[in-house]
Image (tube, helix red, strand yellow):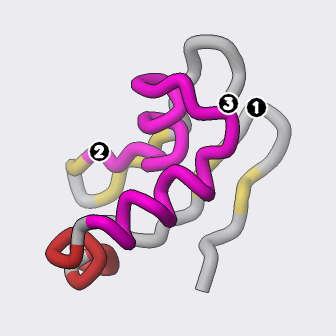
């Protein structure tokens, strides 16, 4: 994440933010993917609802449009 920038996308008048960017901004973790993986392992309810609360969308970065992950 670039200093102070969060990737975001607006669809159907709703704003969506990159979970990894938000977690990076709020924690001191140096490995965001591992942090989220461990978080999901510890919280079964979060893990079971991950696809519902974390909608995959295209995210525009300052360098390119990051494609949606399948």
Q: Name the residue at 54% across, 23% down.
A: 28
Task: Describe the element under mark 2 as helix, strand or loop.
Answer: strand
Alpha carbon of mark 2 to alpha carbon of mark 1: how far?
18 Å
Q: Name the residue at 73% across, 53% down.
A: 65
Task: Describe the element under mark 1 as helix, strand or loop.
Answer: loop
Q: Over which residues does the magenta segment extend?
A: 15-42
Image vertical order of residue 24 relative to residue 50, above or below? above
Residue 16 percent coordinates (x, y): 34, 49
Which residue was labeled with disc 2? 15
Residue placed furthest toward the front: 42
User: Observer-nearest residue: 46 or 54?
Assistant: 46
Whether residue 8 is in magenta: the answer is no
65 to the left or right of 11? right
Alpha carbon of mark 3 to alpha carbon of mark 2: how far?
18 Å
Residue 10 percent coordinates (x, y): 36, 48
Q: Nearer the viewer, mark 3 or mark 1?
A: 3
Alpha carbon of mark 3 to alpha carbon of mark 1: how far?
10 Å
Which residue was labeled with disc 3? 1
Q: Which mark is residue 41?
A: none
Q: Within the image, what quadrant is residue 33 found in? A: bottom right
Q: Earlier in the sequence, mark 2 or mark 1?
A: 2
Q: Residues within 10 Å of mark 3 (few under 14, many from 20)?
A: some
Q: Name the residue at 62% across, 76% down.
A: 69
27 to the left or right of 46? right
Considering the image in quadrants, where does the C terminus appear?
Answer: bottom right
Task: Describe the element under mark 3 as helix, strand or loop.
Answer: loop
Which residue was labeled with disc 1? 62
């Amino acid at each position: 994440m670039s200093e102070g920038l969060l990737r975001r996308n607006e669809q159907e008048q709703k704003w969506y933010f990159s979970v990894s960017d938000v977690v990076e901004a709020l924690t001191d973790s140096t490995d965001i993917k591992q942090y989220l993986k461990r978080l999901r392992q510890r919280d079964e309810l979060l893990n079971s609802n991950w696809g519902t609360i974390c909608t995959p969308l295209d995210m525009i970065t300052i360098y390119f449009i990051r494609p949606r992950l399948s």
